[in-house]
Amino acid sequence: MNTKLSARLLPLAIAIFLSPLSSFLPSQHPVYAADAPGFTDTARHWGATAISWAVQNNIVNGYEDGSFRPDQSVSEPEFLAMLLRAYPEVKLAASASGSAWYKPYYDVADSRKWPVLHNTDATKFNRGLVAQIITASQKGTQSLNDSIRYLLDQGLSEGKTAATVAGYQAADRLSRAEAVQFIRNVKQKQFQLILENGASSAAASSSPESPANPATPQSSASANTVTVKGIHIGDAAEDVIAKLGEPARKDLSEYGFQWFIYNQDYSSYAQIGISGGRVVGLYSTSANWEYNGLSDGSAKSAVLNLYGQPLASITKGNTRFNMNYGKGEYGTYETSDSYVTFFYDLHRNNVVTSIQTIAKPTELALAAFYPEASDSLITAYERQIFDLANAARVKLGKPAFIWDDKIAGTARKHSADMAANNYFAHESKNGASPFDRMKSDGIAMQGAAENIAAGQTSAIYAHEGWMNSEGHRKNLLSDIQRLGVGVAFGGKMTIYYTQNFYTPSK
């Protein structure tokens, strides 16, 4: 946790760039790939996560020029096509020769008596009609206002200007980003489509956010407990492996337990903490967790509405640890059995971007500001920072970095130098810049960058801090290809982190 940093955390330094970074052009990257849609116009868009999810699940594609056009208006048949592609178990009739491409989608809508206009003009389709179609897919045709209230009550929308019927802005046109966000919300809530006979569709979607058997109701216990990839605090380690398979590796944590790292699919990245044969920690930066109706992409306001303001402090024994949430980048809450921390993305309208929960006895047993230094912990932090960078990139539609041992050595030396000489800066005491250090290590580059941090107690907090700092975030989401990470203990800030990025010269 970050409770220990209230008096000792320094601001992150401004990121440094090398001018050749501008030589990276969108044309050098694939226009479209199902696993990593590198669109030219979505990286900083509020809907980036939903867009990436929708593309990866074959719900929608980008355009041949490499763009997604997230703010372009959507027509009624386009929305129907997106919605029904999210439910591949709904069988579409083959389109007859000479008929319009969208006829099979309208046939399904008509068979379910959805209130559709049969109008292909995008200027005639709006958010109100979306509310009526989604509501009809769940409980039959309703009035406009009742449909909007249903979406608000079910957490499928928070409105456009306010979580009210008027604030929903029913008359506004629907954008491509809004369309996929609505559909992702429906899938995250595990809603099924009502069939002609009133039954619900079976869940055969390939979405990683859909469970194997969504028709099975969630128990009240699990509804009020953080669930990551179906795992809860207190589960047996053998049950974790039975459900998720063997982890990619096992890392030491600052708490002393082992993180089981599941990085085989960065779009569903997770860390499961194990101690004494039981789950004592969970962390996810992906759309694979749930907690009392909240999930990846939920609004910060939804957290505050449910739980109020986060803890001001945690008392451990005779010591009170004051919380420092920075600019509201995260918030920690106490539950009956654990401490739950929500991390927010300040660059995407304060949505929840990740969650960590630590069993209460485990958190309370950590009574020091910082963990004890060890080679195992240093290695764990370095590998996790690399994984977290890639999980964030894939989540926002970017390809994963390639690990580079040579530049990791450069990063390690800089972190060690800062720790040994008690400074925190990109420029070394001898005046060497990051790029001087890279060149002296024999690295030929056409573009490079560096992020540094100090004082954070774990890789998780270092990463989350970088993602909420504009310059650091720009480096993490850039078109640079390779990354190496170096961590060192020592000095007045206790822990120093360096990320070095570069693309090799051709």
Image (spheres, grey):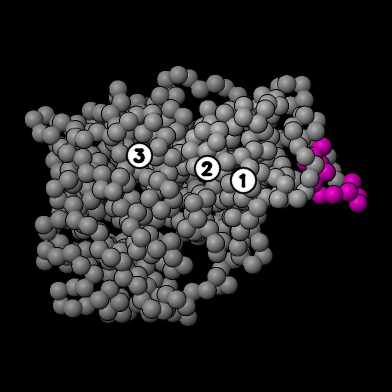
Write down the residue under mark 2.
Answer: 160
Q: Mark 3 points at which residue?
A: 342
Does 34 sit above or below residue 106? below
Of the residues tagged 3 and 2, which is closer to the observer?
Answer: 2
The mark nearer the N terminus, 1 or 3, is 1
Q: Are marks 2 and 1 in contact (CB under 8 Å)?
A: yes
Residue 91's x, y, as percent? 77, 36
Q: Which of marks 1 and 3 is in front?
A: 1
Please state the extent of the stretch shown in magenta in the rendering.
96-107
Amino acid residing under circle 1: Asp
Q: Which of 223 and 81 is in front in this view?
A: 81
> Where's residue 192, x and y in %?
64, 29
- Residue at 23% over, 70% down: 426
Seen at 62% across and 51% down, the residue is 176
Q: Distance between the residues labelled 3 and 2?
A: 23 Å
Q: What residue type is labelled 2?
A: Lys
The vertical placement of 405 against 115, above or below, is below
Q: Give the residue type that dot 3 points to.
A: Phe
Q: Residue 172, which numbered label?
A: 1
Give the left or right position of residue 13, taking residue 197 as reference.
left
Q: Which secondary structure lies at badge 1? A: loop
Indicate the quadrant where residue 305 lies.
Answer: top left
Mark earlier in primary sequence (3, 2): 2
Give the camera-side residue of 166 and 113. 166
Q: Give the left or right position of residue 283, taking residue 296 as reference.
A: left
| 160 in relation to 52, above or below | above
Q: Does the magenta stretch include residue 97?
A: yes
Quarter assignment of residue 215? top right
